[in-house]
Image (cartoon, grey):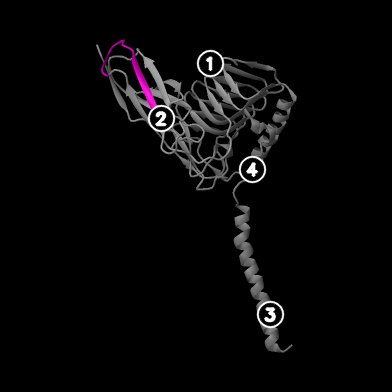
Amino acid sequence: MNRSTTARSKILVASTLVLTTIAFGLLGPATAGAAAQTIPLGSAADFAVLAGSTVTNTGATVATGDLGLSPGTSVTGFPPGVVNGTVHAADNVAAQAKLDLDAAYDDAASRPTTATVPVELGGTTKTPGVYASPAGTFGITGTVTLDAQGDPNAVFIFKAASTLTTASASNVVLVNGARSAEVFWLVGSSATLGTYSVLRGNVMALASITVTTGVLVDGRAMARTAAVTLDTATITRPTGVRQPVATTAVLTSSVNPAAVGEPVGFTAAVTAATGSAVPSGMVVFSDRRVPIAVVALDGTGHAVFTTSALTIGRHPMTATYVGANQFTGSTSPSLVQVVRA
Protein backbone atom coordinates (compact mmCIF):
# COMPACT_ATOMS: atom_id res chain seq x y z
CA MET A 1 0.00 0.00 0.00
CA ASN A 2 1.51 3.37 -1.03
CA ARG A 3 1.57 6.49 1.09
CA SER A 4 -1.38 8.05 -0.78
CA THR A 5 -3.60 5.03 -0.16
CA THR A 6 -2.54 4.86 3.48
CA ALA A 7 -3.35 8.53 3.96
CA ARG A 8 -6.78 8.12 2.36
CA SER A 9 -7.49 5.14 4.62
CA LYS A 10 -6.58 7.14 7.72
CA ILE A 11 -8.79 9.98 6.60
CA LEU A 12 -11.70 7.58 5.97
CA VAL A 13 -11.34 5.98 9.41
CA ALA A 14 -11.10 9.37 11.08
CA SER A 15 -14.14 10.62 9.19
CA THR A 16 -16.11 7.54 10.17
CA LEU A 17 -15.22 8.06 13.83
CA VAL A 18 -16.21 11.72 13.65
CA LEU A 19 -19.53 10.93 11.98
CA THR A 20 -20.20 8.15 14.47
CA THR A 21 -19.44 10.51 17.33
CA ILE A 22 -21.70 13.20 15.87
CA ALA A 23 -24.50 10.70 15.27
CA PHE A 24 -24.18 9.35 18.79
CA GLY A 25 -24.17 12.86 20.18
CA LEU A 26 -27.32 13.68 18.26
CA LEU A 27 -29.16 10.44 18.87
CA GLY A 28 -27.97 9.77 22.41
CA PRO A 29 -29.61 12.74 24.12
CA ALA A 30 -32.81 12.29 22.07
CA THR A 31 -33.09 8.73 23.31
CA ALA A 32 -32.31 9.74 26.89
CA GLY A 33 -34.87 12.53 26.74
CA ALA A 34 -37.55 10.48 25.03
CA ALA A 35 -41.14 10.94 26.15
CA ALA A 36 -42.08 9.20 29.37
CA GLN A 37 -43.83 5.88 29.08
CA THR A 38 -47.28 5.38 30.59
CA ILE A 39 -47.70 3.96 34.09
CA PRO A 40 -49.07 0.38 33.76
CA LEU A 41 -52.08 -0.01 36.07
CA GLY A 42 -52.60 -3.73 35.49
CA SER A 43 -55.97 -4.95 36.74
CA ALA A 44 -56.43 -1.66 38.66
CA ALA A 45 -57.28 -0.09 35.28
CA ASP A 46 -60.75 -1.68 35.51
CA PHE A 47 -61.62 0.42 38.56
CA ALA A 48 -63.05 3.90 38.92
CA VAL A 49 -62.67 3.75 42.73
CA LEU A 50 -60.18 1.62 44.68
CA ALA A 51 -59.41 1.94 48.39
CA GLY A 52 -57.59 0.25 51.25
CA SER A 53 -59.76 0.72 54.38
CA THR A 54 -63.26 1.96 53.47
CA VAL A 55 -65.33 3.44 50.67
CA THR A 56 -67.95 5.85 52.00
CA ASN A 57 -70.50 7.73 49.92
CA THR A 58 -73.11 10.40 50.59
CA GLY A 59 -75.65 11.45 47.96
CA ALA A 60 -76.14 10.62 44.30
CA THR A 61 -72.59 9.69 43.34
CA VAL A 62 -72.15 7.90 40.00
CA ALA A 63 -69.06 5.73 39.51
CA THR A 64 -68.58 4.34 36.01
CA GLY A 65 -66.16 1.44 36.27
CA ASP A 66 -65.60 -1.12 39.01
CA LEU A 67 -65.41 -0.19 42.70
CA GLY A 68 -62.95 -2.10 44.86
CA LEU A 69 -61.81 -2.35 48.47
CA SER A 70 -58.99 -4.40 50.02
CA PRO A 71 -58.18 -5.35 52.72
CA GLY A 72 -61.08 -3.36 54.22
CA THR A 73 -64.65 -4.65 53.99
CA SER A 74 -66.89 -1.57 54.53
CA VAL A 75 -68.51 -0.09 51.42
CA THR A 76 -71.39 2.23 52.37
CA GLY A 77 -73.68 4.65 50.55
CA PHE A 78 -74.48 2.52 47.47
CA PRO A 79 -77.40 3.17 47.09
CA PRO A 80 -78.10 6.07 46.87
CA GLY A 81 -74.80 6.04 44.95
CA VAL A 82 -74.67 4.09 41.68
CA VAL A 83 -71.83 1.89 40.43
CA ASN A 84 -71.91 1.23 36.70
CA GLY A 85 -69.64 -1.75 37.10
CA THR A 86 -68.94 -4.42 39.73
CA VAL A 87 -68.31 -3.93 43.44
CA HIS A 88 -65.38 -6.02 44.71
CA ALA A 89 -65.10 -5.84 48.51
CA ALA A 90 -62.19 -7.81 50.01
CA ASP A 91 -62.30 -10.46 47.27
CA ASN A 92 -59.48 -11.83 45.15
CA VAL A 93 -60.15 -9.35 42.34
CA ALA A 94 -59.81 -6.37 44.69
CA ALA A 95 -56.71 -7.86 46.30
CA GLN A 96 -54.97 -8.25 42.94
CA ALA A 97 -56.00 -4.75 41.88
CA LYS A 98 -54.44 -3.36 45.06
CA LEU A 99 -51.19 -5.20 44.33
CA ASP A 100 -51.19 -3.73 40.83
CA LEU A 101 -51.90 -0.27 42.28
CA ASP A 102 -48.93 -0.67 44.63
CA ALA A 103 -46.70 -1.50 41.66
CA ALA A 104 -48.03 1.43 39.63
CA TYR A 105 -47.50 3.82 42.54
CA ASP A 106 -43.91 2.66 43.02
CA ASP A 107 -43.30 2.93 39.27
CA ALA A 108 -44.54 6.53 39.18
CA ALA A 109 -42.54 7.43 42.30
CA SER A 110 -39.35 6.14 40.67
CA ARG A 111 -39.69 8.27 37.54
CA PRO A 112 -37.04 11.01 37.45
CA THR A 113 -38.44 14.54 37.75
CA THR A 114 -38.09 16.59 34.58
CA ALA A 115 -39.19 19.91 36.11
CA THR A 116 -39.72 21.38 39.57
CA VAL A 117 -42.53 23.93 39.45
CA PRO A 118 -44.43 26.13 41.94
CA VAL A 119 -47.08 24.53 44.14
CA GLU A 120 -49.95 26.39 42.46
CA LEU A 121 -50.76 24.87 39.08
CA GLY A 122 -53.79 27.05 38.34
CA GLY A 123 -53.30 29.54 35.54
CA THR A 124 -50.46 27.56 33.96
CA THR A 125 -50.01 25.31 30.93
CA LYS A 126 -47.96 22.15 31.24
CA THR A 127 -46.48 20.00 28.46
CA PRO A 128 -45.73 16.26 28.86
CA GLY A 129 -43.28 15.49 31.65
CA VAL A 130 -42.74 14.50 35.27
CA TYR A 131 -43.39 17.41 37.65
CA ALA A 132 -42.64 17.98 41.32
CA SER A 133 -42.88 21.02 43.60
CA PRO A 134 -40.29 22.31 46.07
CA ALA A 135 -42.83 22.10 48.91
CA GLY A 136 -43.96 18.59 48.04
CA THR A 137 -47.56 19.70 47.51
CA PHE A 138 -49.72 20.69 44.57
CA GLY A 139 -52.79 22.91 44.47
CA ILE A 140 -55.14 23.91 41.67
CA THR A 141 -57.07 27.18 41.81
CA GLY A 142 -58.73 28.17 38.55
CA THR A 143 -57.62 26.21 35.49
CA VAL A 144 -54.49 24.24 34.63
CA THR A 145 -54.09 23.26 30.97
CA LEU A 146 -52.28 20.07 29.94
CA ASP A 147 -51.03 20.36 26.36
CA ALA A 148 -50.04 17.10 24.65
CA GLN A 149 -48.71 19.01 21.62
CA GLY A 150 -50.44 16.63 19.22
CA ASP A 151 -49.21 13.40 20.84
CA PRO A 152 -52.14 11.20 22.02
CA ASN A 153 -49.66 9.07 23.99
CA ALA A 154 -48.23 12.02 25.92
CA VAL A 155 -47.78 11.27 29.63
CA PHE A 156 -48.13 13.78 32.47
CA ILE A 157 -47.01 12.80 35.99
CA PHE A 158 -47.41 15.14 38.96
CA LYS A 159 -45.56 13.93 42.06
CA ALA A 160 -46.79 15.52 45.31
CA ALA A 161 -44.74 14.19 48.22
CA SER A 162 -47.52 15.09 50.65
CA THR A 163 -50.88 16.50 49.42
CA LEU A 164 -52.97 17.46 46.41
CA THR A 165 -55.73 20.03 46.96
CA THR A 166 -58.09 21.45 44.34
CA ALA A 167 -60.09 24.61 44.98
CA SER A 168 -63.83 24.90 44.46
CA ALA A 169 -64.78 25.08 40.76
CA SER A 170 -61.17 24.50 39.64
CA ASN A 171 -60.57 22.69 36.37
CA VAL A 172 -58.01 20.55 34.54
CA VAL A 173 -58.27 21.10 30.78
CA LEU A 174 -56.77 18.72 28.21
CA VAL A 175 -55.77 20.09 24.79
CA ASN A 176 -54.00 18.99 21.61
CA GLY A 177 -54.54 15.28 22.07
CA ALA A 178 -54.02 15.00 25.84
CA ARG A 179 -55.96 12.12 27.43
CA SER A 180 -57.04 11.64 31.02
CA ALA A 181 -55.83 8.02 30.88
CA GLU A 182 -52.26 9.32 30.57
CA VAL A 183 -52.39 11.83 33.44
CA PHE A 184 -51.19 10.62 36.85
CA TRP A 185 -51.46 12.44 40.18
CA LEU A 186 -49.09 10.74 42.64
CA VAL A 187 -49.88 11.83 46.20
CA GLY A 188 -47.63 10.88 49.12
CA SER A 189 -50.37 11.43 51.71
CA SER A 190 -53.93 12.53 50.93
CA ALA A 191 -55.86 14.26 48.13
CA THR A 192 -58.84 16.59 48.65
CA LEU A 193 -60.92 17.66 45.66
CA GLY A 194 -62.92 20.85 46.25
CA THR A 195 -66.62 21.29 45.51
CA TYR A 196 -67.65 21.37 41.85
CA SER A 197 -64.05 20.99 40.71
CA VAL A 198 -63.07 18.98 37.63
CA LEU A 199 -60.02 16.74 37.82
CA ARG A 200 -58.79 14.72 34.88
CA GLY A 201 -56.41 11.83 35.37
CA ASN A 202 -55.60 9.02 37.78
CA VAL A 203 -55.24 9.96 41.44
CA MET A 204 -52.97 7.48 43.24
CA ALA A 205 -52.76 8.43 46.92
CA LEU A 206 -50.70 6.62 49.52
CA ALA A 207 -53.34 7.34 52.18
CA SER A 208 -56.80 8.78 51.45
CA ILE A 209 -58.87 10.65 48.85
CA THR A 210 -61.79 12.96 49.66
CA VAL A 211 -64.09 13.83 46.76
CA THR A 212 -66.51 16.57 47.82
CA THR A 213 -69.90 17.71 46.51
CA GLY A 214 -70.30 18.08 42.77
CA VAL A 215 -66.78 17.00 41.83
CA LEU A 216 -66.22 15.39 38.44
CA VAL A 217 -63.25 13.04 38.08
CA ASP A 218 -62.49 12.05 34.51
CA GLY A 219 -60.18 9.27 35.62
CA ARG A 220 -59.77 7.19 38.76
CA ALA A 221 -59.66 7.68 42.55
CA MET A 222 -57.30 5.08 44.04
CA ALA A 223 -56.10 5.11 47.66
CA ARG A 224 -53.54 2.52 48.77
CA THR A 225 -53.94 2.32 52.56
CA ALA A 226 -56.90 4.42 53.70
CA ALA A 227 -60.35 5.58 52.60
CA VAL A 228 -62.01 7.03 49.55
CA THR A 229 -64.82 9.36 50.67
CA LEU A 230 -67.39 10.51 48.11
CA ASP A 231 -70.20 13.08 48.17
CA THR A 232 -72.52 13.47 45.17
CA ALA A 233 -69.62 13.11 42.77
CA THR A 234 -69.12 11.71 39.26
CA ILE A 235 -66.13 9.45 38.59
CA THR A 236 -65.70 8.00 35.12
CA ARG A 237 -62.95 5.52 34.28
CA PRO A 238 -61.26 6.50 30.99
CA THR A 239 -61.93 4.20 28.05
CA GLY A 240 -60.66 4.22 24.48
CA VAL A 241 -59.31 7.08 22.43
CA ARG A 242 -61.88 9.45 20.97
CA GLN A 243 -61.45 12.82 19.37
CA PRO A 244 -62.86 15.62 21.55
CA VAL A 245 -66.10 17.25 20.44
CA ALA A 246 -66.64 20.92 21.27
CA THR A 247 -69.91 21.97 22.93
CA THR A 248 -71.98 25.11 23.36
CA ALA A 249 -73.98 25.96 26.49
CA VAL A 250 -76.95 28.34 26.53
CA LEU A 251 -78.82 29.45 29.68
CA THR A 252 -82.45 30.63 29.77
CA SER A 253 -84.80 31.72 32.54
CA SER A 254 -88.48 30.88 32.99
CA VAL A 255 -89.35 34.37 34.22
CA ASN A 256 -87.28 37.56 34.10
CA PRO A 257 -87.75 39.80 35.96
CA ALA A 258 -89.18 37.81 38.86
CA ALA A 259 -90.73 38.80 42.16
CA VAL A 260 -88.78 38.03 45.31
CA GLY A 261 -89.73 34.52 46.50
CA GLU A 262 -91.10 33.56 43.09
CA PRO A 263 -89.74 30.24 41.71
CA VAL A 264 -87.39 30.78 38.78
CA GLY A 265 -86.44 27.90 36.51
CA PHE A 266 -83.06 28.04 34.81
CA THR A 267 -82.53 25.73 31.84
CA ALA A 268 -79.10 24.95 30.44
CA ALA A 269 -79.06 23.54 26.91
CA VAL A 270 -75.80 21.88 25.85
CA THR A 271 -75.26 20.94 22.21
CA ALA A 272 -72.38 19.31 20.34
CA ALA A 273 -70.62 21.29 17.61
CA THR A 274 -70.50 18.25 15.32
CA GLY A 275 -72.34 14.95 14.99
CA SER A 276 -75.71 13.88 16.30
CA ALA A 277 -74.63 12.56 19.72
CA VAL A 278 -76.16 14.29 22.74
CA PRO A 279 -73.74 15.41 25.47
CA SER A 280 -74.08 13.84 28.90
CA GLY A 281 -72.65 14.75 32.28
CA MET A 282 -73.05 17.53 34.80
CA VAL A 283 -73.87 21.24 34.63
CA VAL A 284 -72.85 23.69 37.36
CA PHE A 285 -75.19 26.68 37.86
CA SER A 286 -73.47 29.75 39.31
CA ASP A 287 -74.67 33.09 40.68
CA ARG A 288 -72.00 35.83 40.53
CA ARG A 289 -69.49 33.07 39.70
CA VAL A 290 -70.32 31.19 42.92
CA PRO A 291 -71.60 27.63 42.28
CA ILE A 292 -75.06 27.11 43.74
CA ALA A 293 -76.22 23.83 42.15
CA VAL A 294 -75.05 20.92 40.03
CA VAL A 295 -77.55 19.09 37.82
CA ALA A 296 -77.13 16.19 35.40
CA LEU A 297 -78.06 16.62 31.75
CA ASP A 298 -81.08 14.65 30.64
CA GLY A 299 -81.36 12.62 27.44
CA THR A 300 -81.98 15.75 25.39
CA GLY A 301 -78.93 17.65 26.64
CA HIS A 302 -80.86 19.86 29.06
CA ALA A 303 -80.40 20.51 32.78
CA VAL A 304 -83.00 22.40 34.82
CA PHE A 305 -82.48 24.13 38.16
CA THR A 306 -85.35 25.87 39.97
CA THR A 307 -84.96 28.19 42.95
CA SER A 308 -87.03 30.72 44.88
CA ALA A 309 -84.14 31.82 47.09
CA LEU A 310 -82.73 34.63 44.95
CA THR A 311 -82.53 37.96 46.76
CA ILE A 312 -83.69 41.33 45.43
CA GLY A 313 -81.30 42.70 42.83
CA ARG A 314 -79.43 41.64 39.72
CA HIS A 315 -77.95 38.14 39.52
CA PRO A 316 -75.41 37.34 36.78
CA MET A 317 -76.12 33.65 36.21
CA THR A 318 -74.03 31.17 34.22
CA ALA A 319 -74.22 27.47 33.43
CA THR A 320 -70.97 25.53 33.03
CA TYR A 321 -70.96 22.12 31.37
CA VAL A 322 -67.94 20.34 32.85
CA GLY A 323 -67.50 17.93 29.97
CA ALA A 324 -67.71 14.13 29.86
CA ASN A 325 -66.62 11.28 27.64
CA GLN A 326 -65.56 12.80 24.31
CA PHE A 327 -67.34 16.12 24.91
CA THR A 328 -65.37 19.17 26.03
CA GLY A 329 -66.69 21.60 28.62
CA SER A 330 -68.30 24.97 27.89
CA THR A 331 -69.79 27.91 29.76
CA SER A 332 -72.88 29.85 28.76
CA PRO A 333 -72.94 33.60 28.28
CA SER A 334 -73.98 35.41 31.45
CA LEU A 335 -77.73 35.82 31.96
CA VAL A 336 -78.69 38.70 34.26
CA GLN A 337 -81.66 37.57 36.35
CA VAL A 338 -83.55 40.49 37.89
CA VAL A 339 -85.46 39.99 41.16
CA ARG A 340 -87.83 42.75 42.32
CA ALA A 341 -89.63 43.45 45.55
Q: Residue at x 40, y 23 (%)?
A: 285
Residue 325: image x %, image y %?
Answer: 52, 33
| Front position among marks 4 and 2 | 2
Residue at the limit of the structure toward the left, as seen here: 341
**What residue is pinned by disc 2?**
270
Q: CA distance from mark 2 to mark 3?
A: 73 Å
Q: Residue at x 41, y 32 (%)?
A: 271
Q: Residue at x 65, y 79 (%)?
A: 11
Which quadrant of the figure contains the C terminus?
top left
Q: Secondary structure at mark 4?
A: loop
Quadrant position of residue 103: top right
Amino acid type for the residue under numbered disc 1? Gly
The residues colored magenta run 256-270
**What residue is pinned by disc 4?**
111
**What residue is pinned by disc 1?**
59
Amino acid type for the residue under numbered disc 4? Arg
**What residue is pinned by disc 3?**
10
Q: Secondary structure at mark 1?
A: loop
Q: CA distance from mark 4 to mark 1?
A: 38 Å
Q: Which mark is residue 193?
A: none
Q: CA distance from mark 3 to mark 4?
A: 45 Å
The answer to whether residue 49 shows anywhere in this view is no
Badge 3: few (under 14), some or many (20 or more) residues near its Cα, within 10 Å?
A: few
Contact, mark 2 vs mark 3 (Cβ under 8 Å): no
The front one of 16 and 234 is 234
Relative to residue 203, is residue 69 drawn left or right?
right
Badge 4: few (under 14), some or many (20 or more) residues near its Cα, within 10 Å?
A: some
